[in-house]
């Protein structure tokens, strides 16, 4: 099947920008405010989470920790290459979007995404409390860094909602990220805390970075 060319991404773009997210695993206590705000903002039912929080443990001797996991907005997104409709678009600012007019719900993007970031919107969850979902029924949807807010110069809903300042968001080109409590240098934060990207060895170049959990992390309750 010949792949259809992708249309120009919607919205006003700023090519000089590269949006990134930094998640501090040492701070996360699974308060789930990020999940709740995302659900509300996107009119999603409880079982469809675009931001997920997993309980992780590297080995039996290591302390467990909580890991928030959005879409990683890869610089080399396998989902873009896999879509036969050209429905998945990577903007020049790094955000990966789904064109709901072109998506046919074939799920090929789900098969190639190594991070399980995509979901199929089933017909029975197409509406919630009379409101239309972000993604129409029968197509794919995922975290999009709240691209509409970004265009307004705001941070994503999950960043603003977190009471512990776990999630930082900002512009890598300007070397600045903020968690709503403090604004810091992106490069300094990554260097000082040994920041890393999940499954970086796959070569997808995620735009989401993690700061390692502290070894003494033990409080697993909100």
Image (cartoon, rainbow, N blue to C red):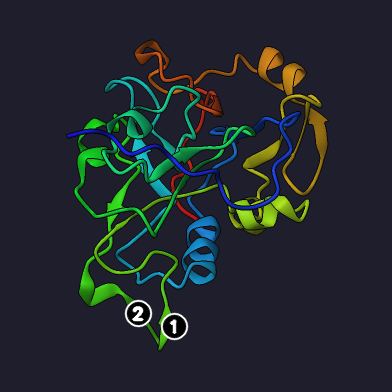
Q: Residue furthest bottom?
A: 130
The Cα–Cα distance between marks 1 and 2, rounded to whole angstroms, is 5 Å
Helix, strand or loop under label 1: strand
SS at badge 2: strand
Residue 189 pos. (x, y %) = 72, 22
Q: Quadrant of the N terminus?
A: top left
Does 18 sit left or right of 90 as displayed? right
* Residue positioned 64% across, 52% down in the render: 11
Q: Position of residue 110 (x, y in %)?
A: 24, 41
Image-based side of 62 in relation to 12, left or right: left
Is 72 placed above or below 144 here? Answer: above
Above-or-below relation of 197 to 131? above
Q: Name the image quarter holding residue 22.
A: top right
148 is higher (above) or lower (below) than 172 = below
Where residue 52 appears, as percent x and y from the top left, is 40, 49
Q: Is residue 43 above or below residue 217?
A: below
Q: Is residue 79 left or right of residue 124?
A: right
> Do callouts 1 and 2 mark residues in contact (Cβ within 8 Å)?
yes
Look at 29% across and 38% down and name the residue there: 83
Please give the label number shown on residue 127. Answer: 2
The total of numbered circles placed on residues is 2
Q: Which mark is residue 164?
A: none
Viewer-proximal residue, 90 or 84? 84
Image coordinates for residue 114, horizontal then vertical, percent? 29, 29
Q: Residues within 10 Å of mark 1 (few under 14, many from 20)?
A: few
- Determine crowd level at label 2: few under 14, some 14-19, many 20+ residues with C-alpha closer than 10 A: some
Q: Which residue is mark 1?
A: 131
The residue depicted at 51 percent of the width and 61 percent of the height is 38
């Amino acid at each position: 099947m010949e792949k259809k060319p992708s249309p120009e991404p919607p919205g006003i773009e700023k090519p000089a920008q590269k949006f990134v997210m930094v998640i501090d695993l040492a701070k996360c206590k699974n308060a789930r405010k990020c999940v709740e705000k995302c659900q509300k903002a996107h009119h999603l039912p409880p079982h469809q989470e675009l931001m997920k929080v997993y309980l992780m443990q590297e080995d039996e001797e290591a302390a467990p920790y909580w890991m928030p996991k959005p879409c990683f907005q890869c610089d080399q997104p396998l989902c873009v290459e896999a879509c036969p409709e050209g429905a998945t678009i990577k903007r020049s600012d790094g955000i990966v979007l789904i064109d709901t007019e072109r998506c046919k719900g074939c799920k090929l993007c789900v098969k190639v995404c190594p991070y399980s970031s995509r979901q199929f919107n089933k017909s029975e969850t197409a509406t919630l409390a009379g409101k239309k979902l972000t993604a129409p029924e029968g197509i794919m949807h995922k975290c999009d860094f709240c691209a509409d807010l970004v265009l307004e110069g705001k941070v994503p809903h999950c960043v603003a909602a977190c009471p512990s300042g776990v999630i930082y968001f900002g512009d890598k080109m300007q070397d600045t990220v903020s968690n709503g409590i403090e604004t810091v240098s992106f490069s300094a934060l990554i260097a000082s805390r040994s920041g890393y990207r999940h499954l970086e060895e796959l070569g997808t170049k995620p735009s989401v970075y993690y700061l390692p959990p502290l070894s003494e992390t033990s409080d697993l309750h909100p």
